């Protein structure tokens, strides 16, 4: 069940396979563990897609806690050359992390998320 061990075994067994990205999820609430976790995947030499992340374990899951984590995590993700893309997990299993209100409009947390500095690849055309 360890994704790093799985990928080591996969790449060893399939050395000629085309793998464009390594996709991962992360739900701890602290930036130190996020950095450590992403660092585990750099060894595979593929861009990392953090396809889901939010604060669900080991921290303040409140809306204020989610905002604090967002404000800390986004700069880390933006500055990590191994992270190609990332997406905040905004769904009912973690209601405090949702970015939209019941009408599909950005809520306060959603406005924080889209208002944080993002790299050039996220800029509007």
Image (cartoon, rainbow, N blue to C red):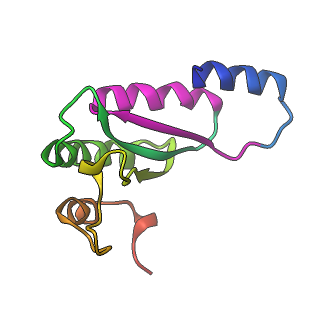
In this picture, residue 6 sits left or right of residue 55: right
| Residue drawn where x is 69% and y is 21% of the image | 8
The reply to whether the magenta stretch includes residue 41 is yes
Highlighted range, magenta: 19-44
Q: Please tell me in which quadrant of the rendered image residue 16 appears.
A: top right
Where residue 38 sits: x, y (%)? 46, 32
In this picture, residue 16 sits left or right of residue 105: right
Where residue 15 sits: x, y (%)? 83, 29
Which residue is nearer to you in this view: 79 or 97?
Answer: 97
Where residue 65 sits: x, y (%)? 17, 41
Does 53 sit above or below residue 110?
A: above
Does 59 sit above or below residue 119?
A: above
Kindly give the residue lying farthest to the bottom in the view shown: 125
Does 49 sit above or below residue 38?
A: below
The reply to whether the magenta stretch includes residue 37 is yes
Q: Please tell me in which quadrant of the rendered image residue 94 appears.
A: top left
Kindly give the residue lying farthest to the left in the view shown: 64
Quarter of the picture holding the C terminus: bottom left
Quarter of the picture holding the N terminus: top right
| Residue drawn where x is 37% and y is 35% of the image | 27
| Residue drawn where x is 42% and y is 66% of the image | 122
| Residue drawn where x is 64% and y is 34% of the image | 45
């Amino acid at each position: 069940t360890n994704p790093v061990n799985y990928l080591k075994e996969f790449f060893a067994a399939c050395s000629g396979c085309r793998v464009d990205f390594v996709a991962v999820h992360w739900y701890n609430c602290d930036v130190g563990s996020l950095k450590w976790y992403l660092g585990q995947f750099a060894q595979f030499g593929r861009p990392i897609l953090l396809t889901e992340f939010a604060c669900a374990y080991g921290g303040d899951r409140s809306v204020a806690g989610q905002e604090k984590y967002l404000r800390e995590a986004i700069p880390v993700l933006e500055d990590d050359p191994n992270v190609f893309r990332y997406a905040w997990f905004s769904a009912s299993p973690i209601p405090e992390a949702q970015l939209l209100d019941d009408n599909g409009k950005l809520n306060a947390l959603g406005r924080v998320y889209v208002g944080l500095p993002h790299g050039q690849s996220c800029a509007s055309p």
